[in-house]
């Protein structure tokens, strides 16, 4: 395993400048200071090359600086940069038309454009309350929906996201997310763990804590992101949809991280055969330009003029980037995510067989989680080893990020090639081997 002398002198100097003027609240993974990128490769300010397995947290879907996206941005910037949401422009309309076309429900869709994922979630919260005239919600443990006040109330992946900010938004009750690798509820005979969680919601939460008539919506990440890249059992969403229909509750899906082709389909929910009422998108929607969207059934997005708005919604440049991004995903990269994702999953299962610290490999498309444990029987999270693998990866030229208690997420640009995946997985396994030897596991 080759170690680079990182960070280099230019990077160290910039980090020192950063510490003097940037909010200390930002969680920095390691001292990587970017200079430029192309496809799935990036270079730091000292000229060191890295392969990217985290894609700006699943954002740069088409790879770094894809020429079609760059051209779309440049052409729009030459026309006009901003007009405000008080008026109209074609890119905004075209994007909404495309989102209507690919929305994961048969009913016509309306979209509210935002600047981020957390703003899209805030929009969904407000819309659900407005449409249903109800005030309460159900969320899930392990969730991450953002850090603004409404969204962070649903976020339940780390206690520090709430610390120092109470009181949060009123009216949110959390249920356990159906993590089949780490179940906390007992299943009945013939019931999968997802169905057991929905039964818990009905029998314990709706029967003993929240009257169903007061619940506006159930907000859930289709595949949990920050909580550990957790794929729920197949029975979860059909059972949840049935529960929502029974009580007139809106099913609100957060696909900020899992949407836009990352799982090999436009939306992760398409793997489960269920249609939501509201869905949120951001991250990979515009290849890194700030853009989000709250997409809802037309019958649900029924609020009156002026009840919700924003200054930068439907930003012309972001919409241009999004249209180019969606076109590339549709024509090339969604299928690539499926194929390279399956290839990576198979390779990771082989790596798992050689390394006792890997407890589970899971995911869909290029949204893959590798969970590390102290031993496979107890499944005790191996947090320190996980972070060491991330650190060793960085030192050898591979960018990764952890999530959950002891999971490394593999979420590269959807444009990554099989040869690049091979290169990255080789570096990944080398890092795992070193970390295990340091910890006396090999």
Image: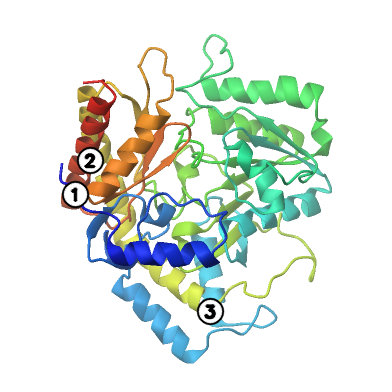
**Residue sitting nearer the eye, 340 or 350:** 350
Q: Residue at image x 75%, y 60%?
A: 302
Return the x and y of residue 86 as percentages of the image width and height. Answer: 70, 81
Q: Residue at image x 27%, y 21%?
A: 356
Residue 316: which numbered mark, if any? 3
Q: Residue at image x 57%, y 47%?
A: 254
Q: Earlier in the sequence, mark 3 or mark 2?
A: 3
Secondary structure under badge 3?
A: helix
Return the x and y of residue 434 as percentages of the image width and height. Answer: 22, 32
Q: Residue at image x 46%, y 35%?
A: 228
Secondary structure under badge 1?
A: helix
Q: Which residue is mark 2?
A: 343
Return the x and y of residue 249 as percentages of the image width and height. Answer: 73, 39
Confirm whether residue 346 shows in the render.
no
Q: Is residue 273 above or below residue 441?
A: below
Secondary structure under badge 2?
A: helix
């Amino acid at each position: 395993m080759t170690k680079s002398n990182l960070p280099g002198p230019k990077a160290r100097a910039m980090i020192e400048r950063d510490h003097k003027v940037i909010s200390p609240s930002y969680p920095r993974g390691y001292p990587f200071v970017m200079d430029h990128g192309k496809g799935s490769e990036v270079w730091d300010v000292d000229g060191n090359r890295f392969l990217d397995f985290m894609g700006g947290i699943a954002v740069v879907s088409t790879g770094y600086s894809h020429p079609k996206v760059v051209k779309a941005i440049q052409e729009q910037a030459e026309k006009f940069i901003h007009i405000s949401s008080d008026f109209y422009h074609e890119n905004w309309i075209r994007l909404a038309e495309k989102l209507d076309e690919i929305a994961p429900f048969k009913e016509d869709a309306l979209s509210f454009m935002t600047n981020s994922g957390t703003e899209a979630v805030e929009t969904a919260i407000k819309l659900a309350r407005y449409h249903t005239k109800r005030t309460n919600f159900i969320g899930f443990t392990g969730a991450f929906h953002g850090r603004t006040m409404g969204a962070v109330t649903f976020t339940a992946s780390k206690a520090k996201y709430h610390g120092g900010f109470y009181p949060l938004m009123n009216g949110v009750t959390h249920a356990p997310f159906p993590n089949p690798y780490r179940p906390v509820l007992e299943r009945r005979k013939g019931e999968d763990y997802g169905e057991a969680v929905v039964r818990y919601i009905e029998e314990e939460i709706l029967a003993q804590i929240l009257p169903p008539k007061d619940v506006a919506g159930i907000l859930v990440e289709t595949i949990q992101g920050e909580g550990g890249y957790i794929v729920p059992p197949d029975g979860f969403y059909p059972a949840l949809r049935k529960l929502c229909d029974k009580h007139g509750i809106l099913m609100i899906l957060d696909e900020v991280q899992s949407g836009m082709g990352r799982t090999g389909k436009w939306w992760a929910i398409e793997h489960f055969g269920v249609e939501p009422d509201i869905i949120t998108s951001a991250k990979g929607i515009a290849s890194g330009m700030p853009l989000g969207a709250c997409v809802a059934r037309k019958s649900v997005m029924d609020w009156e003029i002026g009840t919700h708005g924003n200054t930068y919604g439907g930003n012309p440049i972001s919409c241009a980037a999004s249209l180019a991004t969606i076109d590339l995903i549709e024509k090339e990269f969604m299928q690539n995510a499926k194929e390279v994702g399956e290839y990576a999953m198979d390779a990771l299962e082989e790596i798992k067989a050689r390394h006792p610290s890997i407890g589970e490999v899971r995911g869909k498309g290029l949204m893959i989680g590798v969970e590390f444990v102290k031993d496979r029987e107890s499944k005790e999270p191996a947090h320190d080893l996980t972070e060491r693998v991330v650190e060793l990866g960085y030192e050898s030229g591979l960018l990764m990020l952890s999530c959950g208690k002891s999971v490394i997420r593999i979420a590269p640009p959807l444009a990554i090639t099989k040869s690049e995946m091979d290169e990255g997985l080789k570096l990944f396994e080398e890092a795992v081997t070193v970390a295990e030897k340091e910890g006396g596991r090999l």
